[in-house]
Image (tube, helix red, strand yellow):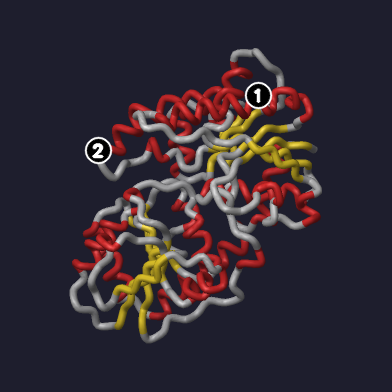
Amino acid sequence: MKIALITDGIWPYVLGGMQKHSYYLCKYLAQKKIQVDLYHFNQSNYDISKLEFFSEEEKQYITSIIVDFPKPGSLPGHYMRNSYLHSKLIFEAIKDKLQTYNFIYTKGFTGWFLIEQKHARKIKCAKIGVKFHGYEMFQKPPDFKIKLQHIFLLRKPVKEISQKADVVFSYGGKITDIIKSIGIDREKIIELPSGVEVSTLTNQIKPCGEVLKFLFLGRYERRKGIEELNSAIQLLSDQKRKIEFHFIGPIPIDKQLKDPTVIYHGEVRDKTKLTSLIKNCDVLICPSWSEGMPNVILEAMANGLTVLATDVGAVNVLVNDRTGYLINDSNSELIKTELSNIINSTDQEIDIKKQNALDLMKENFVWEKLIEKLIQYIK
């Protein structure tokens, strides 16, 4: 079997949740001895020609094809224009190989021109699948500016690409509902979650200690709800138990709280140190306005944490009453109320959720199992 995997970059050459998902797709397809033509580009200081983040055996099944993303412009809408141009450059790179593929998997806008050409019956090729991370442009925006971007720039092309593709991939949860709402037949939708590697799963949870430790992990981005979380922390009154809030990521100084219970670790790139910091906490907080299936939740649960999160995207596939705490909206009062509930819970109640979260990951969200499902879908 031979697959074209057309991406908007793979981790760590390009950083992001979609890029990490693409990396694992490529890695585990190669482990299954499936030939992968990987279309990608570089935004890092690594030498992309070496593919040094794959094993030598994996690289035997991966052909790297570099299609650089156009340089950003200054005029409004430049990202969409460049995305379309990039999809045309990809089409030029792939058009003579189309008949060699059993399936074509495209990420985001990368297959835009290719899908248009097939839908117009100008080319013949295997089925084309498209994956938009979380269809965030159809989720609730955090402010008016982003709402306008969603309405006037993103929704129309995303809807058209999804409708014209042969297959649409979904993480599940509310993302499937969004995909159906924009006119995609249920038979065209393949639900397949993301996951972690078995080797990253912790053996056992760390029981709650004297200090209950909350964690926010990620960069500052408006839709991640960090401003609402900051307000919620400030709304908390004196607590009967000791608590700490740990922030890992490049949080701007003007977004940092002056509070003795809040600790900022900055950006942590060392994997061993990062894992140690995560395992030292009890509850991940993910108060996003919109999401796909957040890697941060997958990785936290894999390290034995329970999760407080907003019910957006595919979050409810992971977080429920057994594994954590779901709130309906990224609202400071709602976050504060749920934080208070957690703080007033017993250690045993929190530890049970932590164990359930870890068990769920082991059973359903490891790449070694997920890749088998994808291969069966493609066959």
The amino acid marked with disc number 2 is Phe
The quadrant in which residue 90 appears is top right
Q: Nearer the viewer, residue 359 or 202?
A: 202
Judged by depth in the image, the label closer to the viewer, 1 or 2, is: 1
| Disc sitting over residue 144 in the figure | 2
The residue lying furthest to the bottom in this view is 210
> In the rendered image, which quarter contains the N terminus?
top right
Locate residue 45, reporting x and y percent. 57, 53
Locate residue 91, reporting x and y percent. 63, 25
* Placement of 157 over or under 123, stated as above or below: below
Residue drawn 33% across and 33% down? Answer: 149
Residue drawn 52% across and 24% down? Answer: 163
Q: Does residue 194 appear in the picture of this structure?
A: no
| Disc sitting over residue 92 in the figure | 1
Q: Is residue 185 left or right of residue 226?
A: right
Q: Nearer the viewer, residue 148 or 337?
A: 148
Assign a secondary structure to mark 1. Answer: helix
Residue drawn 77% across and 37% down? Answer: 2
